[in-house]
Image: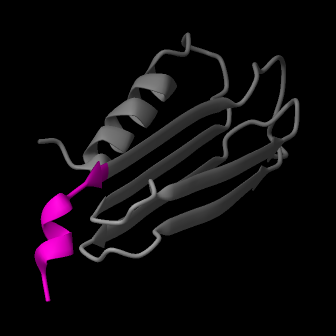
């Protein structure tokens, strides 16, 4: 299985490598979140991933990367997994000519597995 960090690197490299020669690199935001719960609770896990990206229209040459893992294994109580991520990018002084919009690579994996065997543990 490919680790999320390696997948993130491949996605960013692919995004940056797709630009035509002579064009300045745009700004790139990569946000990878994994929220997983394996539990015996009577209610599904509450999993929230709130991501905000604020980038200037002429953003050139900047990158913001965030990775996150929230893992819950076991238990019969309520499960809440909440994440807030904020990315703020500004253009560089060397921005000349045209540049396109910021490239955003959001990856949000949410897994909730009910394990009835947790209710038998004491």
Q: Is residue 119 magenta?
A: yes
Residue placed most toward the observer, 121 or 45: 121
Residue 115, position as x, y percentages in the image: 20, 58
Q: Is residue 2 above or below residue 18?
A: below
Quadrant location of residue 87? bottom right
Residue placed most toward the observer, 50 or 87: 50
Could you tell whether 49 is left or right of 36 in the image?
right
- The boundaries of the magenta stretch are 113-122
Q: Residue at x 29, y 77 (%)?
A: 75
Q: Is residue 106 above or below residue 101?
A: below
Residue placed most toward the observer, 77 or 3: 77
Residue 118, position as x, y percentages in the image: 18, 71
Image colouring? one colour
Could you tell whether 80 is left or right of 41 in the image?
right
Instruction: Assign the C terminus to one quadrant of the image.
Output: bottom left
Residue 91, position as x, y percentages in the image: 82, 43
Q: Residue at x 75, y 45 (%)?
A: 53
Q: Residue at x 54, y 37 (%)?
A: 106
Residue 42, position as x, y percentages in the image: 39, 61
**From this viewpoint, which residue is outermost toward the bottom?**
122
Q: Is residue 93 magenta?
A: no
Q: Residue at x 84, y 19 (%)?
A: 97
């Amino acid at each position: 299985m490919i680790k999320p960090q390696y997948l993130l690197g491949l996605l960013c490299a692919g995004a940056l490598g797709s630009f035509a020669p002579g064009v300045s690199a745009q700004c790139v935001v990569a946000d990878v979140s994994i929220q997983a719960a394996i539990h015996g609770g009577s209610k599904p896990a509450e999993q929230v991933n709130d991501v905000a990206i604020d980038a200037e229209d002429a953003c050139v040459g900047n990158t913001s990367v965030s990775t996150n893992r929230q893992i819950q294994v076991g238990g019969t109580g309520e499960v809440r997994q909440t994440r807030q991520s904020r990315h703020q990018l500004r253009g560089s002084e060397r921005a000349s000519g045209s540049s396109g919009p910021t490239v955003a690579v959001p990856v949000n994996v949410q897994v909730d597995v009910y394990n009835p065997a947790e209710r038998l543990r004491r």
